Image (cartoon, helix red, strand yellow):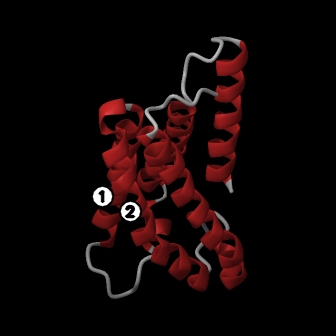
Amino acid sequence: MAPLIVLIGSYFLFWLGNRYIVKGKFSMSIIGRVSLALMLMMTGSAHFFKTEVMMQSMPDFFPYKEGLVYFTGVVELLAAVGLVIDRTAKFTSIMLIIFLVCILPANIIGSLKRVELGGMENGPIYLFFRVPLQLFFIWWTYFFGIRLEAKGSKLKA
């Protein structure tokens, strides 16, 4: 739930600031991408502080779980940087969508194992929230990182 709050909350604050303080200087695309980058900075950094718990979300047969948790944390932090650079935003968004699809099984496994992290402790019922949430993150990445970018970021907030 915290990543969703960071994403929506920061978008709303940036949108208000853009509209009323800087008078529409920034496009909706950059506002959405910066909000997503903030969320990824939060979730990516958690990989270094909650490593043991995140390892529990992986299939039992996976080797090098600790390294994979660190690696995915680095991927999220690099994606945060790539999203805010106009030149790399579209490519980063495409890669991030692939990444978000690939990590969904970890959320499912974590819920089945009732891992004490981000709602997964509620068990399989949490998946009724988490799977649509993951789809929302994928949509957000597509909309702000690919679709609006393709329109040349002309749409102002």
Q: Residues within 10 Å of mark 2 (few under 14, many from 20)?
A: some
The reply to whether discs 2 and 1 touch (Cβ–Cβ < 8 Å) is no
* Side of 100 relative to 13 (left or right): left
The front one of 140 and 121 is: 140
When the figure is inspected, residue 105 is found, relative to residue 48, above or below; the finding is: below
Picture disc at residue 93: none
**Residue at 62% in and 44% down:** 7
Residue 99, image x and y in percent?
38, 62
Can residue 57 be seen here? no
Q: Which amino acid does label 2 sit on?
A: Phe
Residue 71 numbered mark, or none: 1
Q: Position of residue 111 (x, y in %)?
A: 60, 79
Q: Name the residue under label 2.
A: 99
Q: What element carries label 2?
A: helix
Closer to viewer: mark 2 or mark 1: 2
Q: Point out the tag, 2 or 1, that comes first from the N-terminus.
A: 1
Residue 69: x, y in percent?
A: 36, 63
Q: Quick one: label 1, few (<14), some, or many (20+) residues within 10 Å?
A: some
State the residue in front, 105 or 114.
Answer: 105
The C terminus, quarter of image: top right
**Is residue 18 shown left or right of residue 73?**
right
Q: What residue type is labelled 1?
A: Phe
